[in-house]
Image (cartoon, rainbow, N blue to C red):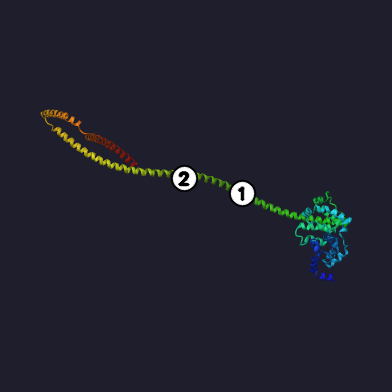
Amino acid sequence: MKTQELDQKPDQADEMVRRGLPFLQLRAAPELLKISQFGASGFAERCNLLRFALQRDAGAADAHAVSCVSFVSLPRRARRLCALVPMETTEGSNGDPARDEDEALWENVESNRYILSRYINPNKLTPYLRQCKVIDEQDEDEVLHSYMLQSRVNRAGRLLDILHTKGQRGYVVFLESLEFYYPDLYKLVTGKEPTRRFSTIVVEEGHEGLTQFLMNEVIKLQQQAKAKDVQRVDILGKHRTLEDEHRKLRLANQELLAFQERYNKMKEERNHINDELSKVKDDNYNLAMRLAQLSEEKNMAVMRSRDLQLEIDQLKHNLNKVEEECKMERKQSLKLKNDIENRPRKEQIIELERENEVLKMKVQELQSIIQPGKQGLPDSEKAIVDILEHDRMEALEDRQDLVNKLYNLREEVRQTEELRDK
């Protein structure tokens, strides 16, 4: 009665299984629950393998609980099949020579499981395995279309697990499929060179089955050859397109090279012009410095011209003064000339000479009288006399200097006028 209720409520049954398996460490239980998704064909072998895993995890003491749990959690049809399969314990499996031999055969496969799962494509192997009746339709559907097997590596691993449950026959057919589709993997697993034998097909289907299989393979190869031809045509079209693009790119590259050469020439011209510009800037700077220097010299020349103009005015004033003196000297010269012209006669001269001699005698007498007096003059008066004499000499020297300076100023004025005219 309880079993019928669980059949009507599979979700509740699964919940009871989860609650009733605290000792399984939730490792074998997910595999047990997934059995409900499998088909009935080939189900008994999976049940044996799953029970063996559960007994291994739970222990021999809980074998009855495992049997009950696996039985309760399965659908009705699966339970019927499961009831037909004898329950195996760990002790029985360990003592079975056939199972030990199968495990020894599969040891080579399991030791290379990573490489096999990585390189095997289940889509290639499943048709051959189905033809040899090692797997059924539901096994193939599970391996190829299960939502829980998303990647090709997972599907290949699941296929190996299913073949593992088939025992020696699964091992032999799997090696033959490797020999046919993956010779390198066959050599890796067995250590032998592939011989391309199809004994299983001959045994199961006869020579006609082998012929049909080979014909199917030939058809597949022809289809693949057609696909390769189409692919080759596409590749040739792409090749032509790429050649056209390559030609265009080569032309574009030549244009770019021409532009590059033109750019390099323009760059060289620009560098040359920049050098000339730098030289022109330096020349302009030097000219500006020279102009500033000339402007400063001009200002100094203007200042000097002003000073010379003042000196010229001063010299003109001195010249006027000297001219007035010259006029006075000329007047005196004229007066002297007149005096010479109006000099007295010879008798008057003789008389004047006599008077002069008399006067000289008187002067000598006076000098003889004054000489002792001069020696008796005080030093202060002597100093005054020396100073007056020195002033007279200096005045004569200053006058000579003024005459020389006037001459020099006239020369400078002449040179200044020449510069001004230039």
Dot 2 amino acid type: Lys
For the residue carrying disc 2, how many other residues have a C-alpha within 10 Å: few (<14), some (14-19), or many (20+)? few
The residue at the point 74 percent across, 54 percent down is 229
Discs 2/1, front: 2
- Measure how far apart labels 2 and 1 are at the Cα level: 40 Å
1 left or right, relative to 279: right
Q: Which secondary structure, mark 1?
A: helix
Mark number displayed over residue 45:
none
| Residue 30: % across, % down | 79, 62
Q: At which x and y percent is residue 20? A: 81, 66
Query: Which numbered marker is on residue 281?
Result: 2
- Res. 206 in view: no
Q: What residue type is labelled 1?
A: Asn
Residue 290 appears in the rendering: yes
Residue 136, percent across and down? 83, 61
Q: Name the residue under label 1.
A: 253
Q: Residue at x 61, y 49 (%)?
A: 253
Q: Is residue 11 above or below residue 283?
A: below
The secondary structure type at the circle numbered 2 is helix
